[in-house]
Amino acid sequence: MRQSKPRIAIAGFQHETNCFGTTKAGLAEFEMADSWPAMLHGEAVIAGTRGMNLPIAGFAKAAEDAGMELAPVLWCAAEPSAHVTDHAFDTICGMILDGLRAAGPLDGIFLDLHGAMVTESHPDGEGEILRRLRAWAGPERPIAVSLDLHANISAALVELADYIAIYRTYPHLDMAETGGRCVPVLQHLLAGGRLHKAFRQMDCLIPLHAQYTGATPGRELYAALPPLAQAGVLADIALGFTAADYPDTRPSCVAYARTAGAAAQAADHIAKLFARLEPHAHHPMLTPEQAAEIACQPRTGKPVVLADVQDNPGAGGTSDTTGLLAALAQAGAQGALMGLFHDPAAAAAAHEAGQGGLFRAALGGRSGAAGDQPFEAEFQVLALGDGRCRYSGEMYGGGVAALGPTAALRLMGTGADITLVVTSLRNQCLDLAHFTHIGLDPAAYKTICVKSTAHFRADFEPIASAVYPVAAPGVFPCDLGSFPYKNLHPDVRTTPARS
C-alpha cells in the first residue's frame, strides 16, 4: 500500500566500458576510491555524496525538498576500463536487490546508472540491471533512471524504465541537476499520471571529442530541448560512447509526453535535427608532431592546452601513452606541463629517490596501442604527494580524488623543459587541482598537456589561449575509422556523413 509520504529507494551502479581497453573492472575496482568515492552502503549513500555533482546527490536533495522519504541502498562506480566481470556485476546487482528487499515498503525506485556498461556476459549492462530489478519491482512500481550523455541506449532499457533523464552538458556540469529532474516525474507517476514514450536511434557514431556541447553539433542539439519542455514534452539526447562495441552503440533520443503522438513527434524532430547537423561533426585533430610545433612557437600570456584525447582514462584509456611526450621532447619544447601519467613503478621510484633526487625510468608505454612504447629518460623529482586531491573545479567540486603516491618530475637530458605529474592510480586530468595539489601552477607554463577528451575544458579553458585535440596512439578511439569494431549494427557509420 502506498504511504502518505512517498518512499523511494535510491541506488547507483556506474561503469563506462571501453571494449578496446586492457584491464577489466572487478569487484575491487567498484569498492575502491579513485576519481569517485568508494562503494557506499545504506545511509552512507546520501552522506557520502551530499553536495557533490552526482545524479544520486541531486536526486536525494530534490526528493528531500519534495517531502519524499528515501531508502538508500548502494552506490558505486569504477574507473572506465574494459568489460565488467560477471562476478562484479552479479555481486553488485545482488547487493542492490538484497537492499531493496530489506528496505520495507517502497513506492518507487531511482537508479543512477551510466548507460554504456558492457559486461563479460551482457552487452547491454544497464538493460540487464533493469531486467533484474523490474522482475522484483513488478510493472506498477515506477523506476526512474539517470544516464550519462555518452550512454548507448537500448530499446529494452527504454521499455523497462518508466523515465530516463540524461546529462545535457559535456563537460558534465549538470549531473546533480539531471538526478533532480527525475523527482517531479516520479511525483507525477505516483499521483497516477501517465507518460507515453518514444525512442529513436541514429545511424552514425560521433567521436567523443566532437561531442563537446560548446560546439556543433552538441550546442544546437541540446538547445532544442527547452522549447520541447515548454510544449510539455520531456526529451533527452544521448550522444553515445564510441568504445563500447555492441549493436546499440550510437546516439539516440528519448521523449515522454502525455500523448503518444506528442512523444513521437518530438523524437522525430530531434532525429531530423541530428541528421541535419551530423555532417558538421568534423572536429580535426593534430598529429603529435603538429602539436609539438605549436608548443614550440614563441608565446606570452595564457598557455595553449593540448588534449591527448585517445589516452583518456575517463574513457578507458591507460593514461600512460607516450606519443605526445616523445614529440615534445624531440622538438625541444620549453615550459610544458603534462599529466596525468599512470605509472605506479615510476611513482614509487620517485618516492624512493626523494625530492630533488634523480632516477632513470622507462615511463609508461604499456598500453599495447600500435606505435606506443615506454619513454626512457632520466627524471628529477620536483615534488611528492600522497595523491589525495580535493577537486576545485565545477564538474567534480566537493569531491576528493585518490591518485595514490604521486610525483612531479622534470625531464632531464633532452634539452626540453617538460614537467610531468605521475600517479599510482588512473585518474582523468580534468581539474586544475590535479596539478596545484602538488605545488604546480598550470597558468605559469607555456603549454599544458592533459590526458582528457573534453571534461578538462570546464576548468582549463578559462586559463587557456587555445585548445587543440591531439591524436596520439591510445586505446580510446577518437579516429573511429582506425579501430577494429566487430559488433556495431550494420547500419551504423563510423565516420560522419558529409554535406
Image (cartoon, rainbow, N blue to C red):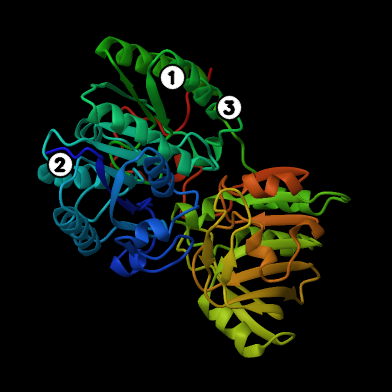
Q: Earlier in the sequence, mark 3 or mark 1?
A: 3
- In this rendering, the label closer to the viewer, 3 or 1: 1
Label ID, residue 229: 1
Q: CA distance from mark 1 to mark 2?
A: 28 Å
Q: For the point 45% across and 21% down, which residue is it?
A: 274
Left or right of residue 419: residue 393: left
475 left or right of 297? left
Residue 231 lies in quadrant = top left
Could you tell me which residue is drawn at 42 percent across and 49 percent down? 57
Number of the front mark, 2 or 3: 2
The residue under label 3 is 216
Query: Residue at the spot x=74%, y=42% of the render?
Result: 466
Q: Nearer the viewer, residue 401 or 444?
A: 401
**Amino acid at the residue labelled 2:** Arg
The x, y position of residue 20, in whole percent, is 38, 53
- The residue beneath circle 2 is 134
Nearest to the observer: residue 459 or residue 358 = 459
Mark 3 and mark 1: span between their CA atoms?
Answer: 21 Å
